[in-house]
Image: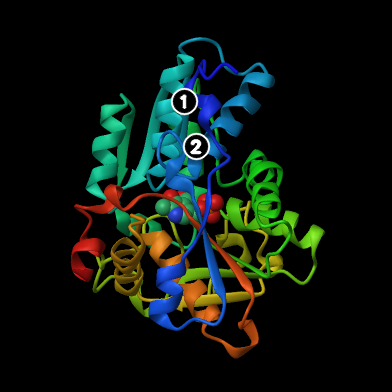
Amino acid sequence: MARIHNSLTDLIGDTPLVELHNYRRNHGLGARILVKIEYLNPAGSVKDRLAWALVQDAEERGLLTPGATLVDVTSGNTGIALAAIGAARGYRVKIYASDNISPDKFRLLEHYGAEVVKVDNAFFLDPEALEKITARIREENPDAVFTDQLANPANPEVHYRTTGPEIWEATGGVVDAFVAGVGTGGTISGVGRYLKERNPSVHLAIAEPAFASLPSEDNPHPPEIDGVHHVTEALPEQLPANFARDIVDEIVPLDPVEAAATARQLAREEGILAGTSAGAILFAATELARRPDFAGKTIVALLPDSGERYLNASTFRAAS
Ligand SMILES: Cc1ncc(COP(=O)(O)O)c(C=O)c1O
């Protein structure tokens, strides 16, 4: 059988599920935790799935001509994925990102040749930030294709079509809980909908940065979890359109330093080098796995990206 791929995009998806045997033993957990390693996607994160879906969607709608520009707002990974896929397909990429995301991500974006617009992190304290940044992108880029990961239905749809079925098939349907984080909400909404359709009793949990850990006027640059937002106190209009809030059964708050410390435990106990949001998601999965009612159950935690992306990030450094 031929083993030659024609494009980077052929390598997206079908990521492995790995059971954390050492971690379960070391932490005395009653439930088993399986991690879905999304950093094994070719541009290094879960966002490869979404970026490819957004590009295919735009191509199918006839919006993309060779040399066209793709634009989006991102905490880095969608930008990196768009930049890689844009390079492979012959499109330019322009990214709006908060200036507090990991410096490693800015280097990656530049390395792939993307144009980067840094947005002051304090801007995102505005309750109308999502609406305002969307309007700004449309106004400043009238000729570009705005992929709009926050609202484009192709985002949850790709997780419904690929990530959810991959988890179901890999576990033979033995999955009692699924844990993710919410950036756009695409992962939890798409995977969650698929799993609940197969088995309505699957428990869906999300990890969020605790309210006390969020940036404020007094402390505008605390350690943060790139890509994962606090949703509990948010008004419905402040949440991304792609986040199906009603599908979530439980929200687990944590401090970003706990997320980074959990990512470090995963590296040291299993050799799995995952990022800060992955640490947050594993922290939440661990909370479930400790509960008597989860004894013997199977919890799937999705690890969005690699720790290599955060070696220079303040959150990772704060935890060491
Ligand atoms: C590192 C990281 N983790 C988690 C997420 C959340 O994924 P989703 O946008 O599907 O909610 C993102 C999204 O930006 C991310 O960049």
| Whether residue 244 is situated above or below residue 86 in the rendered picture | below
Q: Is residue 129 visible?
A: no
Q: Quadrant of residue 73?
A: top left
Q: Which mark, by number, is residue 85?
A: 1
Question: 49 or 152: which is nearer to us?
Answer: 49
Say which amino acid is labelled 1: Ile
**Residue 62 image position (x, y, % from top left):** 66, 16
Label 1 C-beta lies within 8 Å of the nearest ligand 1 atom: no
Question: 107 or 43: which is nearer to us?
Answer: 43
- Residues at circles 2 and 1 in contact by the CB criterion of under 8 Å: yes
Tag count in the figure?
A: 2
Say which amino acid is labelled 2: Asp
Identify residue for label 2.
Answer: 48
- Element assignment for label 2: helix
Q: Quadrant of the C terminus?
A: bottom left
**Residue 300 image position (x, y, % from top left):** 58, 63
Q: Is residue 257 left or right of residue 169?
A: left
Q: Which mark, by number, is residue 139?
A: none
| Whether residue 88 is situated above or below residue 204 in the rendered picture | above
Residue drawn at (59%, 70%) of the image: 205
In primary-sequence order, the first of circles 2 and 1 is 2
| Whether residue 122 is situated above or below residue 69 in the rendered picture | below
Q: Is residue 37 left or right of residue 31?
A: left
Residue drawn at (63%, 47%) of the image: 163
